[in-house]
Every structure is written in C-alpha cells, then in structure tokens.
Amino acid sequence: MRTTASLRLVTDSRREDLAASVARASSQQVRTSLRVGLPEDEAGWVNCGRLLSDADGFASWRASLAEWLDERYGEAPERTTAGHIMTWYLGVPGYLAALLFHHERRVPSLRAEHLAFQTARPRPHPESIAVLDSRFVCLPDDPAASLREATVVPDEQALAAVLRARFTAHAARFVAAFAPTVRFGRHTLWAAATDALDDSMLLAGRYGGDEGSGVLDAALLLPSRLGPLTSGSTIRRQNGGWTRRRESCCFHYLLEQGKGTCSTCPRVMPK
C-alpha cells in the first residue's frame, strides 16, 4: 500500500509534466497562445510536418498574406510575402523553445510533425502554437526529472545545445522545402533562422519582466557563430535599453505605404 508521501510525490510529478510547463510559460506572455495537443476541433490548425511536405501549403499561406497586404497597403511584393512567411514560420519552433527554455529550463520536441500552429485573421500570422509530443529534456534538479517523458542532461550548456540542435534540424527541413519556392539564397534563410532564436529569447525575457535574463540566455544559446546559423547573439545595449541587429530582412520596406526600414534591419544598423 502506498504511503501518503509517495502519493503526494506522484501527484506533484504529474503537475510538472510538459503541459504544466507550457501553461506556466504561456502565462508569462500575451503574444501567442501555447498549448500541448490540439483541441477537439482541429479546424484551422496546420501541422508543420505536413506543411513542409506540401509546397502548395506555403503558396496558399502567401496568397492569404498577399490579400491582406494588398487591402492594407495597396500592394504585395513577392519578396515581402516571402520574407514575412519565412520569419513567421521559423518563429513557431523558435518562440516555443525560447519560452520553455527561459522560464522552465526545458526543451520540448521540435520535430516538425510534433508542432502545429493556427493563423489569425485577417493578418495570417501564427497566433497559436501546439506541441504534440509530451516528451522533454530537462536538468537534473527538475521536479519531473524522474518522469518517463523526461530526458536529463547534466547542465545548462548541454540543455542549450539540445535546443540549438533540435531547432537547427527543424530549420534545415524548412530551408529545404521553402528555398525552391522563393528567390532567396540559403544564407538569407539561415539568417532568418538565427533571428528566430535570438529574437525569441530576448522577447522571452522582455515579456517575463526581466529582459536582461533573456539577453543572458541568448548568449548561452548563441555564444558565437555556429553554422549553419549565421551569427552568435547580436543583442546589444543602445540608448539605455536592449536591441539587436537582425541577420535577415522581412522586406516590409518594399511597401510604399509601409513603415519603411525597421530600426533593427541589417540594411541600416551597423555591425
């Protein structure tokens, strides 16, 4: 017969599963809805693995964006739709991973088949992200380290290496699928992947109320240029706050009625 203490341990461990982590991390920001598993009504959800296997999916997504851009700005340049979709897609694994690493010191599965997203309307950016696998990697002192879903690594550097490797593997599949559909070189696509990680970690700290801790985590994750990523973290102090120099361009500046060049664009920000 189990003791009260052992029952409490089992109950507490169940509270510390990936769903609990995702819920806590999600509560630290308002940018994107996060969840584990899909709702009963899966309408509108896009599985990343299926999207990467179907080039027509990207064409449809770009068409929806072009329609919104045309209604808002009167035009939808090809490079602008490609730049936005590139940035938005890579932000799905990048933002989810950054939030869980920063707030929970956990790394979920980032396999394309294990992630899904739902886009908003009328601007079709990802507004919800779902992780579809309950397994995660964590540190030895994690309360759920003994769960069968957990894989333990020895320290934070090892955990950061797992995140970087899993994200890079997903990004490689995206580059292979998306590159033939756009007029971007592979350096541009990998630059966008680098931005997705670095920017997401800065945002995780900013939304969580401690921007400096996000900066430290970005440096841990991207200490230097580790190919195929195009740089280490580019976050820096400027005018009393933190900013970063983007490695890639979203090409929003091509819209005549747009906001012009972003302040962090590599076209205008010095190295």
Image: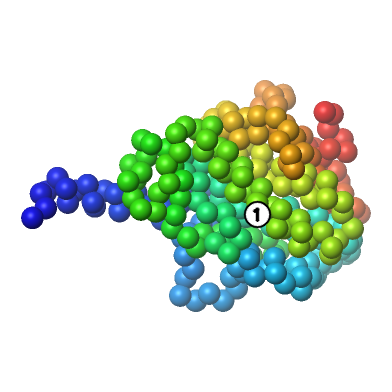
Residue type indicated by callout 1:
His
Label 1: how many Cα within 10 Å (few below 14, some 14–19, many 20+): many
Q: Residue at x 84, y 57 (%)?
A: 80
Q: Quadrant of the C terminus?
A: top right
Q: Secondary structure at mark 1?
A: helix
**Residue 233 at x, y = what percent?**
69, 32
- The residue under the point 36% across, 43% down is 145
Residue at 61% from the left image edge and 45% from the top image edge:
165
**On the image, which quarter does residue 117 sit in?**
bottom right
Residue 161: % across, % down: 58, 38
- Residue that numbered label 1 is attached to: 170
Q: Is residue 189 above or below residue 210?
A: below
Q: Residue furthest left?
A: 1
Q: Is residue 182 visible?
A: yes
Position of residue 225 relative to residue 6, above or below, is above
Specify the quadrant that holds the N terminus. bottom left
Is residue 211 visible in the rendered structure shown here?
no
Left or right? Give the position of 99 relative to 195. Answer: left
Left or right for 258, reference 145: right
